[in-house]
Amino acid sequence: MVSQKTEAIVIRTFPLKEFHKIITFYTPDFGKVKAVAYGVKSPKSRLGGSLELLNHGTLIFQYRENRELQNITDFNLISGFDAMRSDFTRITYGCYFAELVDSIASEGITSPEIFDLLRTTYQFLADADDVPLLARGFEIKFLDCAGYGPELSQCVHCSSSMNRLPINENGVATRNFGMGFSVRYGGVLCANCKNRDGAAFAITPGSCELLKMLRRAEWERLNRIRASTGNHTELKRVLGSFIEYYTERRLKSLKFIENVL
Ligand SMILES: [Zn+2]
């Protein structure tokens, strides 16, 4: 048994008997870590307040290889992202991001990029003008970090380039109309190949370009990006179906967002 220290964000909590909790952390050094916090719900526990969902801190735990549950020694709070917590919509999206990371990230596989993405997203969430657009940005960036990022630059069937849209004399992009997005093939299909997947979604060139922009953009630039209602509808459908395909389930927090917000 070795004592380990790492930064961590609480991505799931689950009650265990009267006073204990099972906590799932996401860490840059160990990926997903599941651990028991004994007595954490007792009024005397010094860890009680710090192990709330979405808190960011320094975790010290006793690491045992091949054990499903580790033992928490200490957790020192760095940030509770208080600005995000004061707004119901933002905290609800925050919970969705945590559930998404929990559903795809496997234990034992480390990704400092996923940790950084989660931390910087929570830092920025309070300032985002368009929270659903930030959610689409999180989804595409997370899929990229997790190795599931969709192909957006060339047709996944014939490899023809989907970059740069030639503009005609009326200022309208002339190519790529009729393109589709195939969840099964993992990316865009050009108009000629769209019927290769009968379940492919229609996606406009504008929404595809927006998705590429979200994939690249730093969070600080997000408030300068504008999305139409049509872009929102398309990207939500495309990314939602893509995520459902890889997680093999409908995420509870996403259902909540659709039904309540
Ligand atoms: Zn094609």
Image (cartoon, rainbow, N blue to C red):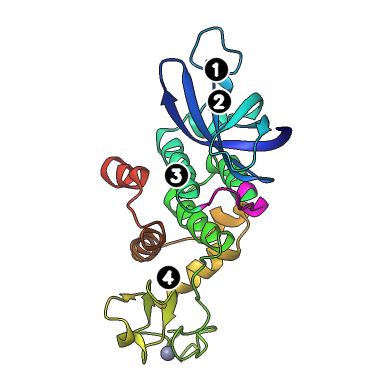
The residue where tag 3 is placed is 99
- Residue position marked by numbered label 2 in the rendering: 51
Q: Amino acid at mark 3?
A: Glu
The residue labelled by disc 1 is 48
Q: Amino acid at mark 4?
A: Ser
In the rendered structure, are the residues bearing label 1 and label 2 in contact, judged by CB atoms less than 8 Å apart? Answer: yes
Along the polypeptide, which appears first: circle 1 or circle 4? Answer: 1
The x, y position of residue 55, in whole percent, is: 57, 31
Judge from the rendering whether residue 104 lies leftward or rightward of residue 30; answer left or right: left
Q: Where is residue 155? Give x, y as percent.
A: 46, 85
Could you tell me which secondary element the residue under label 1 belongs to? helix
Inspect the image, locate mark 1, and give the three-letter code of the amino acid beneath it: Gly
Q: CA distance from mark 3 to mark 2?
A: 16 Å
Q: Amino acid at mark 2?
A: Leu
Residue closer to the observer: 141 or 46: 46
Nearest to N terminus: mark 4 or mark 3: 3
Q: Residue at x 55, y 67 (%)?
A: 213
Q: CA distance from mark 4 to mark 3?
A: 25 Å
Q: Is tag 3's residue or tag 2's residue first in the polypeptide sequence?
A: 2
Q: Is residue 221 magenta?
A: no
Mark 1 or mark 4, which is nearer to you? Answer: 1
Locate residue 203, reporting x and y percent: 36, 74
Residue under circle 4? 207
Q: Residues within 10 Å of mark 1 (few under 14, many from 20)?
A: some
Real-space CA distance between mark 1 and mark 4, rounded to the nearest whole angstrom: 45 Å
Q: Quadrant of the N terminus?
A: top right
How far apart are the alpha carbons under marks 1 and 2?
6 Å
